[in-house]
Amino acid sequence: MNAPAGPGVVVPDPVNEPVRRYPAGSAARAGLQQALRQFAGEQLELTNTIGGHSRPGGGEPRDVVVPHEYRRVLGTLRESTHADACAAVAAAKAAAPGWRELAPTDRAAVFLRAAQALAGPWRDIVNAATMLGQGKTAHQAEIDAACELVDFWRFNVAFAARLAGDQPHSITGEWNRLDLRPLEGFVYAVTPFNFTSIAGNLPTAPALMGNTVVWKPAPTQALAAHLLMRLLEAAGLPPGVINLVGGSGVPVSEVVCADPELAGVHFTGSTAVFTRLWQALAANLDRYRGYPRIVGETGGKDFVVAHPSADVDVVRAALVRAAFEYSGQKCSAASRAYLPASLWRRLGSDLAAATEALTVGDVGEFDHFTGAVIDARAYARLAAACTRAADDPSVTILAGARCDDGVGWFVRPTVLLGTDPGREWFTEELFGPILAVYVYDDDRPGAWADVLDLVDRTSAYALTGAVIGTDRAALAQAEQALRFCAGNLSINDAPTGAVVGRQPFGGTRRSGTDDKAGSAQNLLRWVAPRIIKENLDAPLGHPRRSGSNVGENKHQGIHGL
Ligand code: NAD
């Protein structure tokens, strides 16, 4: 059913954007290849957008390159300075009155238009930018940059309408109304490299609710971010509503976090950066006009745990997909697996062979399973991890652990068999294609309860996880035992692949504030609800004694705040 947006208004029913396939010889592939070619030989100037004006940042230049061929430069951005950040904050403040006074339907229309454009004429170019800039295969770009972002924009409009329609009860003689006010001030959106959809959602969700935004995308996502900004402008986003400032973010945060009108932070990225941001907010707390809303989705150490009743093929498929798609650079990627010895005897060599068979290369060739990792820093971190794994006596390398940065930042999908479940392979987020496997003795009484307990207490993170098995009682036991170690739990599936509107996404512990991107819960963080009570039958007197009704009209209660 369509959701009401306010008195007499309904918004379109959202449906998940169908995933386009790109088979060889198809028109879809030809269109995407054409878009990929548009970036050949061209180096874009990836400017800031402040108050509707495109201009370069005032700092040092920085190239945005292709991860699988890092000598190829796609564009150049300039680090944003304090002055750029001040200008962005001023533009956000200046645009706020006009934007919040627009009817919610007018704001929603901008994002519905953006969704329509992304599903249609902008699809190929945004997908191509995500493939080249962020190293995604066509399929991974399609489910992220096209489908998920279209879904965020369409579903958020419906969620916002539902929130506005959820009005308080009114009794006879009184009318109670909910006014979903935007926050008083501006919102700071800081987005990661690994999802174009998250980059698009974090600034637009607060904007949909009437806020203006300073948006700091990741430098390695700057090409697709630049295109999203152009798309939003084409969809009618007024100048100053979202102000894009590129670069590392350090000078931008220094300005933004010290501004009294900072009203919210919408962050996705690593736990370490989010922790630093929160500390900066705490240090500035006395300056703020109000308490800033803080929403952060951060790191993960996502698990797959199999029961002896699990189907071996389901386990293999879940592990390969969840650990190695996009080279393990999804926050939901499986990086630790707990498998029963009885199943491992049938799976071990198969999993190693399946992993070695995955092809890694130029994502523009369409046939590779995955591409390079995002940048030299990630490559160095992962190559060092492979070296440490080779030196760790508790680890046997079953597949991969080979790296090559001659042309691109390639790290082979890697399976490590570890006998010590307390080692870093099972506890730390490595954020690459490295899966650690721990085999438990399922002959022992209580083995299932023990392994669930191990999964729960091993990692500081609690983002996603998967339980695989066919024994219903064992699945039910796992659902209870793992209640607090994943915000998104899959049963008989990979822990990756959340879909907007169906599996709202987010985790707890060191994985974030669990404000579920792509849900009404998230949108509620960007409003300050006001309740207006109008008395339609105003009292004409006052009581003479405590507890007396004399002087009150017949409908007035005697309790309340
Ligand atoms: P990151 O923390 O390195 O960067 C995130 C953003 O913060 C980038 O825009 C970066 O430039 C910026 N940044 C860094 N220091 C900053 C500062 N001092 N001030 C302002 N901005 C600053 O993360 P990343 O490498 O882009 O993304 C990978 C991380 O994100 C992983 O840890 C992954 O698990 C996490 N992630 C989580 C989710 C989720 O939903 N939980 C989703 C995607 C990614």
Image: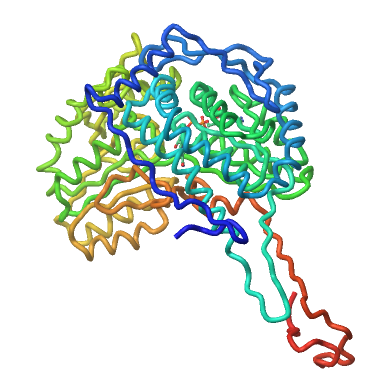
Relative depth, front residue between 433 and 367: 367
Residue 486 visible in the picture: no
Relative depth, front residue between 246 and 332: 246
Q: Quadrant of residue 93?
A: top right
Residue 317 placed where, x, y %? 20, 40
Tell me if residue 221 comes above or below residue 278 in the rendering.
Answer: above
Relative depth, front residue between 513 and 307: 513
- For image coordinates 70% across by 36% down, the residue present is 257
Q: Quarter holding the C terminus?
A: bottom right
Q: Quadrant of residue 62?
A: top right
Q: Is residue 233 left or right of residue 469?
A: right
Q: Quarter holding the N terminus?
A: bottom left
Residue 252 visible in the picture: yes
Q: Is residue 509 left or right of residue 329?
A: right
Residue 181 placed where, x, y %? 69, 53
- For image coordinates 48% across by 51% down, the residue present is 12
Relative depth, front residue between 203 and 275: 203
Tell me if residue 524 comes above or below residue 65 in the rendering.
Answer: below
- For image coordinates 36% across by 29% down, the residue present is 432
Question: Colour scheme of this structure image?
Answer: rainbow
Q: Total marks drawn? A: 0
Residue 170 placed where, x, y %? 66, 75
Q: Is residue 291 left or right of residue 78?
A: right
Q: Residue furthest front?
A: 8
Residue 75 placed where, x, y %? 51, 13
- For image coordinates 50% across by 10% down, the residue present is 43
Q: Is residue 264 left or right of residue 346?
A: right
Q: Residue furthest left?
A: 346
